[in-house]
Image: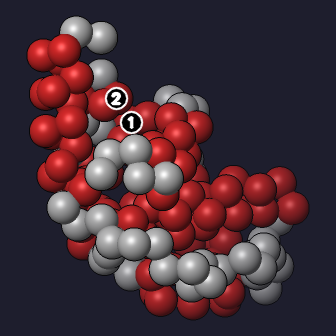
Amino acid sequence: MTTARLTQTRAQTKTFNQAVTKPKQGKANTTPITDGPALVAWRKQVGITQKVFAEMADFSERTMASCENDAKVLTKLQRPINETVRLTNALSELAGDSKSLKSWLHQPNPAFGGKPPMQMIKNGESDRLWEMVHQIRQGAFA
């Protein structure tokens, strides 16, 4: 990566990083979600819409609504739901609030080749977001 490109990437990443706060340890839900009411409660507590969560979990809104209405979430859906919960918790603790997070998820980001982070999630590249979370937690962008 050229020096100019690296400088540009760092400068544009500051948009998100300005909202970054020191991670709030112990605030994230670590209990796997296995039922609809727990998913609804978590989603409302975090302040993320059903539509955004469905997008992140790669579900239709209809599937998401069914999950939230079920007493027990189908076993095959528990993994993507809990992976999405973990990623959302990690990004939310960095963003500081759900409004900043929702905006950031849909904005093109030079750190991801100009793709919005939501596109990275949809493309199965959430590991790149996890890498960014780890780097921010370690102070790599400070």
**Residue 2 rendering spot, x and y as whole percentages:** 22, 9
Asked if 12 appears above or below 62 in the picture, the reply is above
Q: Tell me if I can see residue 60 in this picture.
A: no
Q: Write down the quadrant of residue 26 in the picture.
A: bottom right
Count up the numbered dots: 2
- Horizontal arrangement in the rendering, residue 42 relative to residue 81 (left or right): left
Q: Quadrant of the N terminus?
A: top left
Numbered mark located on residue 19 in the image = none
- Horizontal arrangement in the rendering, residue 88 relative to residue 51 (left or right): right
Query: What residue type is disc 2 on?
Result: Phe
**Residue 132 rendering spot, x and y as whole percentages:** 45, 43
Along the line of sight, the residue nearer the viewer: 5 or 126: 5
Pointer 2 local density, CA inside 10 Å: few below 14, some 14–19, many at least 20: some
The residue tagged 2 is 112
Q: Write down the quadrant of residue 107 in the picture.
A: top left
**Residue 95 rendering spot, x and y as whole percentages:** 32, 66
Tag 2–tag 1 contact (CB < 8 Å): yes
Asked if 9 appears above or below 4 in the picture, the reply is below
The residue tagged 1 is 119
Q: Secondary structure at mark 2?
A: helix
- Horizontal arrangement in the rendering, residue 132 relative to residue 82 (left or right): left
Q: Tell me if I can see residue 30 in this picture.
A: yes
Q: Residue at x 50, y 35 (%)?
A: 128
The mark lying in front, picked from 2 and 1, is 2
Q: Residue at x 46, y 87 (%)?
A: 44
Q: Write down the quadrant of residue 3 in the picture.
A: top left
Dot placed on the residue nearer the N-terminal end, 2 or 1: 2
- Horizontal arrangement in the rendering, residue 49 relative to residue 57 (left or right): left
Query: What residue type is disc 1 on?
Result: Gln
